[in-house]
Amino acid sequence: MARFRSSILVLLLLFLGSLVTPAHAQSSIQVIRDAASLTFPENIDFKAEFQSGVNITSVVLEYGSDQLTCGTVEAKAFPTFTPATDVKVVWTWEMRQSGSLAPGAAVWWRWQVRDASGAQFTSPTQTILWLDNVHPWQGITGGNIALHYYNGGDSFGQQLHDVAAQALLRLSQDVGVSTDSPVDIYIYANTTDLQEAVLYEPSWSGGQAFPQDNIVIIGISPDQLDWGKSTEAHELTHVLVGHLTFSCLGFVPTWLNEGLAVYGEGGPQAYEKTLFDQAVAGNTLMSLRSLGGNFPNTDTGYLAYAESYSAVNFLIKTYGRNKMTNLLLDLRDGATADEALMTVYGFNVDGLDDAWRTSIGLAPHAGSSTPTPVPTPTAVPTFVPVGAAPVAAAGLSTPHPAQVGTSATPSATLQAAVPTVTSVSPSQKPVVNLSRFIPILKIGLACLVIAVLLAGLAIFLMLRHQKRRGK
């Protein structure tokens, strides 16, 4: 009985011992250093040091910027190091590889660390402002506008802040676009300073909106104040419209996006207005449908801005704010411009074009020079049999006017060997003429019958020969 009790005691001690982690496996990961530094506008260096009672085996950096995204975006980096109880890691975010962030964007990061015992550690999330420290930035806040500047004096900064706040109020009342958090506006002293702050910035750019970051940047010198005020309101509108319509499904046509931006700044510039008046007088306005893509940096582009404003102003003044807001929301939800306009206003892009032209004293288009795009038929390779007639003669018609993938008829010596690619309308199916294959089929069938008969005769003779030998 005593032996039995001793055995029970030993088993109990072994069980309890299994619940206790050996001293050498105990771990407590500690962060000794965790910092980030900027080399603006080139890169961000993330540096950290960690210690543990056992070797650290995994260190992962998670990082990103606070901006609108279609889903959870969490970038990860895996700095190289040698496993040890004390490790130092460095990882650099190269902006020339990833593309530059908006000046003023908030960058966050944290570390995920694991050691040989299986212990895990997550460092506290930290943030750093992606902004140069070369300029002595000052700030004015209020009315959901946070203006940052370093040149021109207090009056200069206050005027730009007030214009932005007024534009924000006007856009909220007239268009229905607003913001729940302050929009950051960074005013550089000139376009040279602006272009140096953003990698790959076009040489002609004087301002830029970053709707996903709620940020506007503009280069404005004190002697450009009037231009700066209108440009500030223009880019602010892009941020607000971009916020309202942000999604992974929607697309806002350029004529609407830029038309609203010009509306936000109070109307077109004098030169744009002159071009518009001349186009109206000469009845040479471009169709709205042709203004759905990028505008060129030419007189045609300036006219496009003025036309877009005029059409958007017509919609707002004639039908009111609510319909414009609903139009933007439908576009956000994935509707095409034609679908959204038809749902909200009862006409498509061409119908809007005609109604707008009528409002400015022009006759509707007799026939749009740029009609609604029709899906291009898929090019289907058609192999022409040897000696067959050309494809068209064989009953495969080519739709008009879209002749995509067609070419001159191949020469007689090559036509049999080279496949001809011809557009085929979805409503048209190739007609295959089988009559020319009937003689070939008859000959083939006859050969097959003869082959079967000969094979049967051969088998009959072989069996007969074997029977005679067996006698």
Image: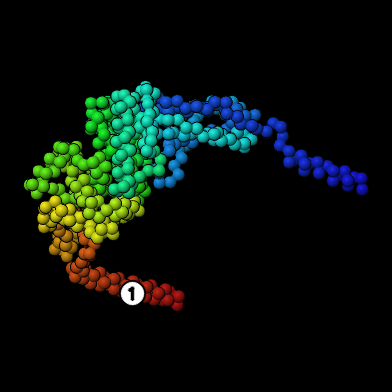
Residue 198 visible? The answer is no
Along the line of sight, which residue is nearer the eye, 246 or 434? 246
Q: Residue at x 8, y 47 (%)?
A: 281
Along the line of sight, which residue is nearer the eye, 380 or 29? 29
Quarter assignment of residue 196: top left
Q: Where's residue 347, x and y in %?
A: 23, 59
Q: Where's residue 162, x and y in %?
A: 31, 35
Q: Residue at x 35, y 32 (%)?
A: 147
Decide if residue 17 is on the left or right side of residue 420: right
Quarter assignment of residue 233: top left
* Crowd around label 1: few <14 · some 14–19 · many ≥20 (10 Å): few
Q: Where's residue 380, x and y in %?
A: 24, 57
Number of marks present in the image shown? 1
Q: Is residue 86 above or below residue 391?
A: above
Q: Residue at x 72, y 34 (%)?
A: 22
Q: Residue at x 19, y 70 (%)?
A: 435
